[in-house]
Image (cartoon, rainbow, N blue to C red):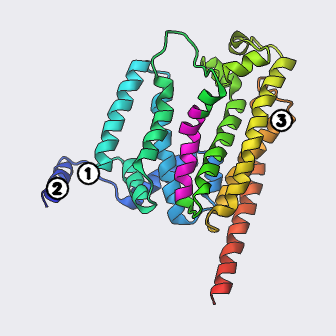
């Protein structure tokens, strides 16, 4: 009773201070707007979900987007970003413990976590992934990963954890789905890393494992300071080795699909299809990610989404017919 009375008192104080507290519907609407504006590949899959699941996924995305933006704001120093992140995390921990909050993302994520049994520990891991780039390091030293095992850990935190959250919203029954979701996240993140090699190098980041660079005779300086050079055969071989790893992990995505609740399966299919198409475009460009950034054309994404929505409609129609 004391806790309830305390919360009511704080709520009254917030209202008295003219701090507007959004409703749950308003909070989800804010998250959906963020996802629609920022999610790009992800948002096409969100559209193929039933409303409650779509709202929950958008809330998780908005939460992830905020953490990522705080971590990557290069207009601020590392110390300033760490301070902002610490303050944001403190606010989030208060909100998730039940304290009133006016942050629509916190309101929506708290509800989504409760509705779909999402452990807060997974969200903690997600934030841990985004804050890895804030770890202290010598001035001007690039972000690198020594081995593929080190890179896998990074990919797990920034992508696989998202997959583990998503399948709780999608619905699944087989425990093995969790390992497949983890490996699907690895496939997605390796695809992102390949696409962004040039852009990351400009930000003093090389996510390709140093052991792989050495195995293919490519120096770190070669990736960081290209100066407009054409891609070399050794660089192609390096990037192909990462693409081959990604392709192997996409096999896990295909195994995951039938384990997901049928109502959510079209959305996962859309997401996997778009990301896999991106990898295929990188391969078809003969791994030249330096002269032009690879992307999946909007027309292609819309065609994939159309198939996904059609599948969802067919599934719902089938359920109605057999339930009669």
* Quarter where residue 28 is shown: bottom left
Foreground label between 1 and 3? 3
Q: Residue at point 75% right, 49% down?
A: 251
Q: Residue at point 72% right, 67% down?
A: 311
Q: Quadrant of the N terminus?
A: bottom left
Q: What stretch is highlighted in magenta?
A: 153-168
Residue at numbered disc 3:
283
Residue 63, given in percent of the width and then of the height, sits at 46, 44
Q: Can residue 248 be seen in this view?
A: yes
Residue 223, given in percent of the width and then of the height, sits at 71, 16
- State whether residue 323 is above or below residue 238: below
Residue at numbered disc 2:
3
Q: Which of marks 3 and 2 is nearer the N terminus?
A: 2
Distance of label 3 from label 2 (alpha carbons) = 57 Å
Q: Earlier in the sequence, mark 1 or mark 3?
A: 1
Q: Earlier in the sequence, mark 1 or mark 2?
A: 2
Q: In this view, does 226 lie to the left or right of 48?
A: right
Q: In this view, does 156 lie to the left or right of 128?
A: right
- State whether residue 41 is above or below residue 201: below
Q: Do the residues labelled 1 and 3 touch (CB within 8 Å)?
A: no
Foreground label between 1 and 2? 2
Q: Is residue 102 visible?
A: no
Residue at numbered disc 1:
100
Q: Residue at point 31% right, 47% down?
A: 95
Q: Is mark 3 on a helix, strand or loop?
A: helix
The mark found on residue 263 in the picture is: none
* Quarter where residue 145 is shown: top right
Q: What element carries label 2?
A: helix
Q: In this view, does 13 lie to the left or right of 63?
A: left
């Amino acid at each position: 009773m004391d806790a309830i009375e305390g919360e009511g008192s704080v709520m009254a104080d917030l209202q008295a201070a003219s701090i507007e507290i959004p409703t749950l519907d308003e909070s989800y609407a804010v998250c959906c707007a963020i996802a629609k504006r920022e999610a790009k590949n992800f948002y096409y899959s969100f559209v193929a979900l039933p409303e409650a699941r779509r709202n929950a996924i958008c809330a998780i995305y908005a939460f992830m987007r905020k953490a990522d933006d705080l971590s990557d704001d290069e207009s601020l120093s590392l110390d300033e970003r760490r301070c902002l992140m610490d303050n944001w995390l403190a606010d989030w921990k208060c909100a998730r413990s039940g304290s009133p909050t006016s942050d629509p993302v916190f309101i929506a994520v708290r509800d989504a976590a409760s509705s779909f049994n999402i452990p807060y520990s997974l969200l903690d891991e997600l934030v841990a992934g985004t804050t890895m780039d804030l770890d202290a390091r010598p001035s001007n030293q690039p972000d690198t990963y020594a081995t593929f095992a080190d890179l896998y850990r990074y990919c797990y935190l920034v992508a696989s954890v998202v997959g583990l959250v998503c399948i709780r919203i999608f619905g699944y029954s087989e425990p093995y789905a969790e390992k497949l979701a983890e490996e699907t996240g690895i496939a997605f993140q390796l695809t992102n890393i390949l696409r962004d090699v040039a852009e990351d190098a400009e930000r003093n980041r090389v996510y390709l494992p140093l052991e792989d660079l050495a195995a293919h005779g490519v120096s770190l300086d070669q990736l960081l300071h290209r100066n407009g050079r054409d891609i070399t055969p050794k660089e192609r071989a390096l990037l192909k080795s990462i693409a081959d790893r990604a392709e192997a992990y996409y096999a896990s995505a295909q195994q995951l699909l039938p384990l997901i609740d049928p109502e959510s399966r079209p959305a996962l299919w859309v997401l996997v299809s778009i990301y896999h198409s991106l990898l295929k475009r990188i391969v078809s460009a003969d791994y030249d990610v330096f002269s032009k950034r690879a992307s999946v054309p909007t027309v292609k994404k819309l065609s994939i989404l159309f198939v996904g929505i059609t599948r969802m409609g067919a599934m719902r129609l089938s359920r109605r017919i057999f339930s009669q």
